Amino acid sequence: MPDQTEWETKAANLLKAELKRKGVTYAQLVEKLAAMGIEEKEVNVRNKLSRGKFTAAFLLQCLSALGSSLLHLD
């Protein structure tokens, strides 16, 4: 069974893969989040994804901003 750090890495990689698949940069993600009324700084988003330390709510906000409705967890 994966430990906490492995789950955090998996979550961060999932979000990074979705960004890449959609062709969206961190700066563009920040703009999309701002359009939803969610204020984030690019450096904060970059840090969250590099550490894998973010809430499920942040993950859902990002996926919503990207227009993602289907995820592949493998």
Image (tube, rainbow, N blue to C red):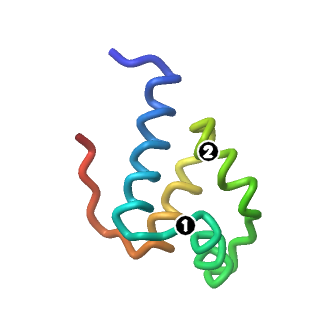
The residue where tag 1 is placed is 25
Element under label 2?
A: loop
Q: Which mark is residue 4?
A: none
In the rendered image, residue 64, in percent from the top left (x then y), is placed at: 46, 71
In percent of the image, x 31 and y 69: which residue is there?
A: 69
The part of the image, by quadrant, that contains residue 29 is bottom right
In percent of the image, x 39 and y 47: which residue is there?
A: 14
* Foreground label between 2 and 1: 1
In the rendered image, residue 11, in percent from the top left (x then y), is placed at: 45, 41
User: Extreme bottom residue here?
Assistant: 35
In percent of the image, x 74 and y 53: which residue is there?
A: 44
Q: Which mark is residue 54?
A: 2
* Towards the viewer: 56 or 20: 20
In the rendered image, residue 16, in percent from the top left (x then y), is placed at: 46, 52
3D distance between C-alphas at marks 2 and 1: 18 Å
The 10 Å Cα crowd at callout 2, few under 14, some 14 to 19, many 20 or more, is: some
In percent of the image, x 56 and y 56: which residue is there?
A: 57
37 is higher (above) or lower (below) than 51: below
Element under label 1?
A: loop
In the rendered image, residue 22, in percent from the top left (x then y), is placed at: 38, 70
| Image side of residue 23 versus residue 55, left or right | left
Q: In which quadrant will I find the C terminus? A: top left
